[in-house]
């Protein structure tokens, strides 16, 4: 123990201590190292992407179609796509249909708008295409876009397509879930054939919770867990008084059977513009072959669209 | 999305290891974690500074805590600032956005938990029992990026940040019981009281530091002086064990701790080496975890289990820490202390000089140091002295005891007509302006007229009222100036004494001690005024009158010896033996005494109680003196004493 009898000495010592402490505070202080936790979560994951940038323009070319193909056409590779699709309306009535298509682009023939923006490439039909021995039809492949405010359409060419199960189309082709569908192409006389695996069927459920006026309206989405790592959920709005669905955002999340879409995503949807929300669950197998000479994406998906009233 | 969290606030883990109550060192007591009761054996001020380096993937340094403590008698107050008590987590929220170029951008969250400062208070009820409380302030910074769609002309996503800062206090109490030098116990609460803010954002609510009520129990065993074994158990199922060894000023400690939230069972250790100097205590400690802390941790574990402690959790890194503690004692350390004080005299206010010459009390004191100390004793009697009266300085050998006297001064101005029971404060000063020790004892202060029966002390009554006597005598002698002027100079004192005697006895009556309850002596003015008194009063009065005109007097003490004690007066005629015939032819009526300068002078005894005339009083005085003092050898045998007034 240190005895200081003089008050003056004590004050001097305390002054030194104070200065010493301040110096340390200024020169010797880092911040304790933070712990950066890596993302090993098997549960929640949500990757949000805007799909419909102009909600006033239903013809905005976003590349989305009911097959679940959402890529911009200018970046879309040659495509073989198989879809098993369900649509559950507000009245809980569910329609099912199958859709298969194949599109081949001629990269030497780009299509530009008047602003010289690449829109897409012309397509070509190299031969016959069969899905599970069902001969695919060839249909025109047309896209719509706005060019300096004027709605235009253009024909890219033809594509192969089988569509069955809706609007009286009673084609024999049926999309088999969790199975193999054979694809066969007579490519300018050369036979190409391979099997395409399809994912498990997805069946979704949508429950809206909360209240828009309270700002806590959120969507609890559930689906049966499948055999893919992720599922895509496309949230779209059906334009009021028109039977036209505009995709708004896409959420990619773990295929864990549950996702809560936060209120900020539901509350923000303008009710004066949209009267219904469409949640489209997509479970997809996809593989892209890309080499110097050619590219090909093969995808198969189970799709379930659920239409609910926007409160 | 973040769904779950379980975070508990600080528990008993300390960065210096666990040292129990650490009777040898102060430093570990600055840890509120293991010293919730704020136990301290500081004598005055204490300052502690804890600086350390943390070994994450990089090495960074930081001030972990700065503490200040102050002891005020049995109270101890402490406060600490803990800039290094914080833990920050950065992780992806699970949300991400796809931007124009189709790349994904993850959204992140940043949660920071901090203990900013704390306050401690304790009270030492006895040397064995201490109780106290600590109050600690925590803050939690939650920051989380979110993505929000904006519906304008164009639909787009924006990254936004939700932030919330949540502050709270927590208070805990603890007690310590030191059974003996070998064994002590601690008992304290964990999260007893909590008050502060709550999370408003439901996303963060679950990540607030959990404050579940718990308790801890500590026991410290010192089987031999150089070894201590400590154990602390929390009802959260965590515990610590430590072993401390002491080698003179050096000490070594090793603490092993178990935390149910960490792997392995013994999650780590805190080795410590410390040095205790005269001023400083230095602690060099380390925290070594037995599991890999540099690996990548997944967010899943954090979301499921959270952390249990800000500075000790599964994500804490190994550390090296240096603690400097400084003990500043502005209060002089006690070098001496009283064992006992004995008042040997009651106070007689009239005996003023007596207490300067003779101690009124003695104290037995002990030197507590290993050095010689010079002790300055001082005393003060309540109601008598306004300031301390210093007694002679005594030098005391190391660890020796000594008996030191206390002297006092009774001011001339002190007046009291009755006895008062007061008290005396005794002080021992060594170096500082503050006494090392003090003692209080009751003291009886008698009235001004009280007398202890010692004839020698009658001189104080004679001297005290001298001014009255001077006036009285001058007046009497003035009236007899004519007679005195006609006398030989040699006979002047004789006749002055004779005249004063006649005037003195003119109106007096002898009264045997009028205060039957005890010795009571009248001052000369009181005797004249009351016109009476006993032998003491009359002798005092006559002596005072003679002394006031320069006639040297003495009191003759005829000691009781089974009979009534008696006092009469001798006075110096200044006549030399050859001049005796000027006043008497009877050589038994005078006595020769040698003066200070070796000259023989004639002294006459006067029996003052004989209120007839001077010759009779002289004769009676001579007869008594001759018989008892000379013939019966009273002076030789000590039965008769002559007490000179000056």
Image (cartoon, rainbow, N blue to C red):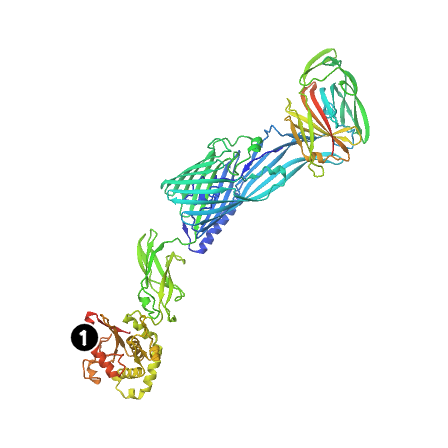
Please say if A99 is above or below B19.
above
Label 1: few (<14), some (14–19) or many (≥20) C-alpha neighbours in 10 Å = few
Q: Quadrant of the C terminus of chain A?
A: top right
Percent from the top left, x then y, of residue B598? 22, 75
User: Can the viewer see residue B40?
Assistant: no
In the image, B332 versus A217, the foreground residue is: A217
**Quadrant of residue B520 in the image?**
bottom left
In the image, B220 versus A25, the foreground residue is: B220
User: Can the viewer see residue B536?
Assistant: yes
**Chain that bears disc 1:** B
Percent from the top left, x then y, of residue B263? 49, 31
Percent from the top left, x then y, of residue B186? 44, 42
Identify the residue position indicated by label 1 in the image: B630
Q: Is residue B459 shown left or right of residue A111?
A: left
Percent from the top left, x then y, of residue B450? 33, 70
The secondary structure type at the circle numbered 1 is: helix
- Number of marks in picture: 1
**Quadrant of residue B231 in the image?**
top left
Q: Of all residues shown, which one is farthest toward the left?
A: B631
**Quadrant of residue B96 in the image?**
top right
Please say if A196 is above or below B457.
above
Q: Is residue B50 shown left or right of residue A134?
A: left
In the image, A267 versus B188, the foreground residue is: B188
Please say if B356 is above or below B555.
above
């Amino acid at each position: 123990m240190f005895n200081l009898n003089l008050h003056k000495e004590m004050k001097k010592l305390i002054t030194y201590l104070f200065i010493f402490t301040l110096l340390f505070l200024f020169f010797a202080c880092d911040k304790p190292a933070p712990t950066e936790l890596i993302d090993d979560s098997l549960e929640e994951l949500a990757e949000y992407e805007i799909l419909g940038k102009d909600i006033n323009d239903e013809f905005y070319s976003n590349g989305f179609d009911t097959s679940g193909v959402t890529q911009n056409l200018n970046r879309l590779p040659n495509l073989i796509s198989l879809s098993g699709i369900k649509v559950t309306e507000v009245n809980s009535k569910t329609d099912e249909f199958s859709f298969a298509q194949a599109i081949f682009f001629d990269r030497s023939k780009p299509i530009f708008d008047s602003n010289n923006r690449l829109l897409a490439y012309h397509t070509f039909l190299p031969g016959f295409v069969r899905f599970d021995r069902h001969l695919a039809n060839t249909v025109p492949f047309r896209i719509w876009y706005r060019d300096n405010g004027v709605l235009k359409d253009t024909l890219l060419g033809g594509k192969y397509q089988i569509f069955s199960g809706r609007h009286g189309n009673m084609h024999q082709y049926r999309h088999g879930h969790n199975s193999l569908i054979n694809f066969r192409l007579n490519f300018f006389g050369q036979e190409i054939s391979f099997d395409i695996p399809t994912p498990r069927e997805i069946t979704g459920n949508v429950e809206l919770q909360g209240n828009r006026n309270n700002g806590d309206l959120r969507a609890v989405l559930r689906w049966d867990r499948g055999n893919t790592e992720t599922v895509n959920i496309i949230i779209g709005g059906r334009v009021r008084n028109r039977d036209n669905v505009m995709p708004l955002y896409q959420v990619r999340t773990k295929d864990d059977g549950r996702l809560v879409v936060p209120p900020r995503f539901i509350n923000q949807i303008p009710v004066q513009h949209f009267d219904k929300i469409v949640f489209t669950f997509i479970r997809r197998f996809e593989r892209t072959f890309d080499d110097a000479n050619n590219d090909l994406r093969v995808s198969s998906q189970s799709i379930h669209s659920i239409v609910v009233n926007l409160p | 999305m973040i769904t779950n969290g379980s975070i508990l606030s600080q528990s008993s883990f300390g960065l210096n290891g666990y040292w129990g109550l650490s009777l040898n060192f102060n430093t570990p007591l600055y840890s509120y974690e293991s010293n919730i009761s704020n136990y301290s054996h500081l004598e005055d001020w204490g300052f502690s500074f804890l600086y350390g380096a943390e070994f994450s993937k990089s090495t960074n340094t930081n001030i972990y805590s700065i503490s200040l403590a102050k002891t005020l008698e049995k109270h101890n107050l402490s406060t600490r600032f803990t800039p290094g008590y914080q833990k920050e987590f950065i992780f992806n929220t699970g949300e991400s956005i796809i931007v124009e170029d189709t790349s994904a951008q993850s959204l992140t969250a940043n949660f920071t938990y901090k203990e900013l400062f704390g306050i401690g208070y304790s009270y030492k009820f006895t040397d064995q029992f201490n109780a106290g409380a600590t109050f600690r302030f925590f803050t939690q910074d939650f920051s989380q990026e979110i993505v929000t769609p904006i519906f304008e002309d164009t639909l787009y996503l924006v990254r936004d940040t939700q932030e919330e800062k949540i502050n709270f206090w927590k208070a805990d109490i603890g007690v310590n019981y030191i059974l003996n030098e070998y064994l002590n116990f601690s008992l304290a609460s964990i999260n007893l009281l909590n008050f502060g803010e709550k999370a408003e954002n439901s996303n963060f609510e679950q990540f607030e530091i959990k404050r579940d009520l718990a308790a801890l129990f500590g026991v410290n065993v010192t089987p031999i002086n150089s070894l201590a074994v400590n154990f602390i158990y929390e009802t959260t199922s965590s515990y610590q064990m430590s072993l401390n060894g002491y080698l003179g000023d050096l000490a070594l400690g090793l603490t092993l701790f178990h935390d149910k939230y960490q792997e392995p069972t013994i999650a780590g250790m805190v080795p410590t080496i410390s040095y205790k100097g005269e001023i400083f205590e230095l602690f060099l400690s380390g925290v070594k975890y037995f599991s890999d802390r540099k690996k990548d941790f997944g967010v899943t574990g954090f979301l499921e289990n959270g952390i249990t402690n800000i500075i000790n959790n599964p994500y804490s890194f190994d550390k090296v820490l240096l603690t400097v503690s400084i003990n500043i004692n502005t209060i002089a350390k006690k070098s001496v202390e009283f064992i006992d004080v004995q008042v040997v005299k009651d106070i007689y206010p009239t005996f003023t000089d007596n207490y300067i010459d003779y101690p009124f009390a003695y104290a037995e004191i002990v030197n507590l140091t290993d050095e010689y100390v010079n002790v300055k004793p001082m005393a003060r009697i309540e109601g008598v002295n306004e300031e301390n009266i210093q007694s002679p300085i005594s030098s005391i050998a190391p660890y020796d005891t000594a008996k030191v006297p206390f002297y006092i001064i009774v001011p001339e101005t002190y007046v009291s007509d009755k006895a008062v029971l007061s008290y005396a404060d005794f002080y021992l000063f060594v170096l500082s302006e503050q006494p090392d020790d003090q003692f209080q004892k009751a003291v009886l202060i008698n009235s001004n007229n009280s007398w202890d029966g010692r004839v020698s002390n009658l001189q104080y009554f004679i001297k005290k009222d001298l001014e009255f006597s001077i006036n009285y005598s001058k007046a009497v002698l003035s009236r007899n100036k004519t007679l005195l002027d006609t006398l030989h100079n040699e006979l002047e004192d004789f006749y002055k004494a004779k005249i004063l005697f006649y005037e003195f006895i003119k109106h007096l009556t002898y009264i045997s001690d009028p205060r039957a309850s005890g010795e009571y002596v009248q001052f000369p003015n009181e005797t004249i005024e009351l016109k009476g008194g006993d032998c003491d009063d009359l002798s005092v009065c006559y002596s005072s009158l003679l002394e006031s005109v320069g006639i040297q007097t003495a009191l003759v003490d005829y000691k009781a010896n089974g009979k009534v004690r008696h006092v009469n007066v001798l006075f110096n005629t200044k006549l030399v033996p050859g001049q005796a015939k000027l006043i008497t032819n009877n050589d038994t009526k005078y006595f020769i005494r040698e003066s200070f300068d070796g000259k023989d002078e004639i002294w006459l005894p006067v029996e003052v109680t004989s209120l007839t005339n001077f010759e009779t009083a002289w004769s009676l005085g001579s007869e008594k003196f001759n018989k008892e003092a000379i013939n019966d050898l009273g002076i030789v045998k000590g039965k008769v004493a002559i007490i000179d007034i000056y």
